[in-house]
Amino acid sequence: MRGARGWVPALAVFVLGILLWEGYIAAFDVQRFLLPRPTDIVQTFWNERDVLWGAGWFTFKEALGGFAIGSAAGVLAALVCARWRPLGRALMPYMIAANAIPIIAFAPITNQWFGLLNPLSKMVIAAVLCFFPVMVNTLRGLTSVRPQSIELMRSYAAGEATIFRRVRIPNSLPYLFAALKVASVLAMIGAVVGEYFGGSQEALGVQIRNSAALFRFETAWAAILVASILGIAFYLAITAVERVALRWERRGIE
Amino acid sequence: MSSLARRIGSFLLVLVGLVLLWEGFKWVAEATELRLGTFTVNDTTFPHLYDIVGQLFEPSRRNGPMLIEVLWDSALFTAKEAVAGFLLGAVVGLAIGIVLHHSRLLQRGFLPYIVASQTVPILAIAPMVVVYLGGELQAPGWVSVAVIAAYLTFFPVTVNTLRGLASADPRALELMRSYAASPFEVLWKLKLPASLPYLFAAFKISATASVVGAMIGELPSSIQDGLGGAILNFNQYYLSSPESLWATNLIAALLGISFFLVILLVERLVVRRAPEHIA
Amino acid sequence: MSGPEPVVSIRTVSKSFVQGQVQALQEIDLEIRPREFVSLIGPSGCGKSTLLRIVGDLIQPTQGDVVVNGKTAQQARRDRDYGIVFQDAVLYDWRTVAKNISLPLEMAKWDRAKRQARVGEMLELVELTGFEDRYPWQLSGGMQQRVSIARALSFSPELLLMDEPFGALDEMTRERLNGELLRIWDDTGSTVVFVTHSIAEAVFLSTRVAVMSPRPGRIAQVIDIDLPHPRTQATREEPRFFELVTEVREALHGGSARPAPARTAEADR
């Protein structure tokens, strides 16, 4: 827990960045439509806040839904693979390979399945994006227990279920939360990108695409700002939950 | 039975298993008329695997070349952009990581924004990157795409570079100090080699990310020749030929996996140490 | 005291940590002459490793200074006048045995031919010829330590600093490596400062043993070890050996025999 002084450099960079941005545009007379001024963006952000936040919330729900489904499925799969090791060992390489598949390419297909306007089509993309990191990392956390801990439990005549409950699951929590943090960002990105391929007008991704297409870059950037803020807020929420859940763990949280 | 034969055997087993899963699910879903909202399972929404694979060998359009040829060319096109993006992102990520490692101040100042940058949906800024680079700087289309791919690539590399450089054994640092080593020598002879496992872990993520970035980058650039363009194209004609879009996805998946395998191979050649050290 | 110039002069060195709250070393005075083998022994926390690192300019003293080879400790480090061996072999696991040994030679910008020749010599010295292309994880703990010693000696420093180098090894390997270390010491004519926990090891190896007291560390006593050289396993069974071991042990206990705080009946309830 760093004190306020830890934030000074970041704050300084922010202020400097904004000043440079404004200065660059003024000095080089950059076309407004290419790179809008920060002040214009903030102005648009304020003016259109209802529409933007409405769209943001709509997209965020998709992200949240996908995150919940994908992470739950990932944890479940990890538990199964940890319980029945041969299955886990056999599947692991394929899970890792599957993680290398560009899921985004699947977005048009989910659109065909559930319809362009149905949030479910974007939720599925977000869910699949979340599934693999959560599954792989949770599995690693469940299985990377020191052999001595397991031997200790066996000396207490503990059964598999007890070992899971008392040793493996607590051990896997840091890994799980690390994966959830990654998944939170991926879910948001998945939802927005999924919308690019088509979606309801109320969706943030569609807003961004349309504004950019109409060269209304202030709106586009304002919408991007909303997406970013929501993504960061989601990430920080997970971090807060992590801090509570891992109270007993004294390690540097990365 | 040799280990290689066993590996191939289990791979084939899993492949067969997946095929059975697919067709089995399809058969059951169609028989029970499974529904999820408006989603039903039929030959349009869920083509047979053999139809998908078969479509590869059909002409992509009337009197045109086979689909697989078209997709092969698209994949190669996207692959080149992805490689360019990967290299750019890896170099930039490494450089940023090294600089931030040596300066706590810069780290505290910039790291929050570097992390935040990944919450910006890449697709959103892609059009602007294209307009700027293509318009103002007159760069060819693939450059914009490579930049977008690099954007997705650099972050895991930066994070893992920071972690890897910091992972050097404190005793080894003392040893270098006893040799009166300069900071550069410490970096080159100790910290960078020590961070290789971490770097390769990042490269595996970045390999896929660069392919995704390349495909996504093609969309606002209106590039037809790559996989992104192919996806948009076959999406339009989905109802008349759903297998084509699925086949494109298959090729895209193979592209992503092959990038990943290349990194695995390079890792096995470069990182020669105790088995448990390989990430 | 007349005689050759000391290799290491520790002059009233004190070291405290945490803004003076932890006094690790208090006014250490010690001179180490050429070709001596001096062991530092003491209970855990007495600061012997800290003292070794101060000599190596890896830590700075709070007070006092160290003169090595007539120079400041810092200059001696810059001139690479010493080699250091830690309890952990600290080999780079991405380098072969040969490349690990040649690390300091690369830093000193020796050319390849000279490096290879010297690596060969060093491998002979520690009796690991033939292991050039092995990786550290393919070697046993004892072998790794021998590589570590070879590396420390590769550039022929006059001074060798060793921080419990055999502490992580089993007794038998340890005794064998003790003998090898003495042989190497004799061959190279170097001066050794050796930190250890083991009384037997200190007596077997050294010409003098400096017994340190618990924190804050002071030199309680310096004991001359007058056993003849060369020393062998047989030496460990000589009566004089046991006498010296007892002398060191008593010096150690004497140092820690400060009256313990009185335990009253109330405290025990």
Image: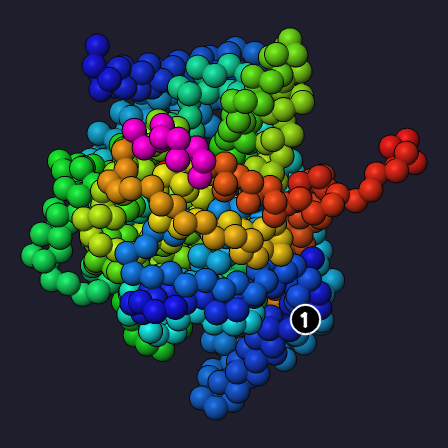
Q: Residue B86 at what x, y percent from top left?
A: 32, 54
Please identify the quadrant where the C terminus of chain B is shown: top left
- B148 vs C15, left or right, is left
Based on the displayed image, in which of its 4 quarters is residue B115 positioned?
A: bottom right
- C191 vs C54, left or right, is left
Q: Residue A130 at what x, y percent from top left?
A: 54, 38
Residue C164 seen? yes
Task: Give whichever of B51, C96 is nearer the camera.
Answer: C96
Q: The magenta stretch spans which residues?
A: C233-244
As shown in the figure, which amino acid type bears the numbered disc 1? Arg
- Name the residue that disc number 1 marks: A5
Q: Residue B128 at what x, y percent from top left?
A: 45, 68
Task: Give whichever of A129, B186 is nearer the camera.
Answer: B186
| Vertical comparison of C211 with C107: above or below | above
- Tell me the element at label 1: helix
Residue shown at 62%/56% (left/top)?
A: C216
Please identify the quadrant where the N terminus of chain B is shown: top left
Q: What sort of colour scheme is used for the picture?
A: rainbow
Q: Residue C168 at what x, y percent from top left?
A: 42, 35
